Image: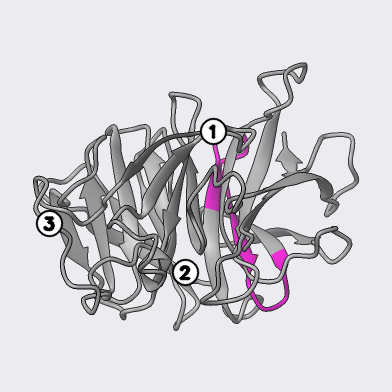
Amino acid sequence: MVAILLLLAYASWLTAGEIAFVRSFETWLAHPRIIASTDPVGITYHPSGHLFISDSEINELNQFWDCENIFEISLPGDQTFNSYDAYGSNGTPCPPLSNFTEREPTGITYNWFDDYFYTTDDDEGAIFRYGSNFGAPNVSLRLDSGRDAEGITSAPDTGYLYVVEGDSAKILVYDVNVPPVPVFVYDFQVGDRIADPEGIAHSSISNHLFIVSRRTRQIFEYTTEGNLVQEYDMSHFEPQPINPAGLTFAPSSAPNDDPRSLNLYIVDRQGDNVADGIVMKPGFR
């Protein structure tokens, strides 16, 4: 059983459109089982210096599942600090295993602007907001444009949420400054380039969005207004991405790297409905 994160590097000294593979680590290891995530699909960075991974199908392995579907891990992927139930309600028992559709988070982002976590759920077609310990969401928002809510990211300066609506290949933008729920602001199409957008990450350095295509295994860089900037190819990576999903920018996990050097951490689920996945790391400056 395997699950993987790919760590990729894009740096100022690389030519335009180039991305370099740095390393990967598994999110599921039988001996020892460091990160008990079999189908990681979302990933985000938190100011604690930790990564948070959302798992959409851990409940299918009922011999391991205890209703915890968010995993707080170290940057190198060698430690799990906490695991959380993103749909629980004040410690109430886990519902019957047949009730899968309410416990399948897809994307996840930590919003530096308002200090909340946000997840998406493609079964529910919704955005959920959580405090630091997760549990029952304190805000839920049903999407107007469809039910296929995939990746989500946020901009720290504005707090805007950028949500991938997979079926329509749109990026939906929401403002969190208008309580009680995020308010839709605008959207833009990416379907001319990406038939199956999945994960999305915001770069605080360039203020650009990076969107991964599951089918072509490419990364597309867009402005927040929806203009294409660059395309990046991952076909030369080893291990080869099979089912890339979520991605986020975070500091390098190498101890001697410049702390200002950001890497792009990419979750790769490998096969579907089996215990596997990858975290890949390329770095973007």
Residue under label 3? 93
Task: Give neighbour class at mark 2: few <14, some 14-19, many 20+ (Cα, 10 Å).
Answer: some
In the foreground, 220 or 240:
240
Residue 217 painted magenta: yes
> Residue 188's mark?
2
Residue under label 1? 79
Q: Earlier in the sequence, mark 3 or mark 1?
A: 1
Residue shown at 83% from the left, 54% from the top: 17
- In this rendering, would 104 be left or right of 217? left
Counting from the top left corner in percent of width and height, residue 204 is at 55, 35
SS assignment at label 1: loop
> Which residue range is magenta in the image?
201-218
Task: Give neighbour class at mark 3: few <14, some 14-19, many 20+ (Cα, 10 Å).
Answer: few
Numbered marks: total: 3
Residue 171 painted magenta: no
What's the amino acid at mark 2? Phe
What's the amino acid at mark 1? Gln
SS assignment at label 2: strand
- In this rendering, would 268 be left or right of 101? right
Counting from the top left corner in percent of width and height, residue 238 is at 85, 58
What's the amino acid at mark 3? Pro
Residue 163, by quadrant, is bottom left
Residue 214, by quadrant, is bottom right
Distance (Cα) linking label 1 and label 2: 38 Å
Q: Earlier in the sequence, mark 2 or mark 3?
A: 3
Q: Quick check: 197 above or below 46?
A: below
Residue 101, by quadrant, is bottom left
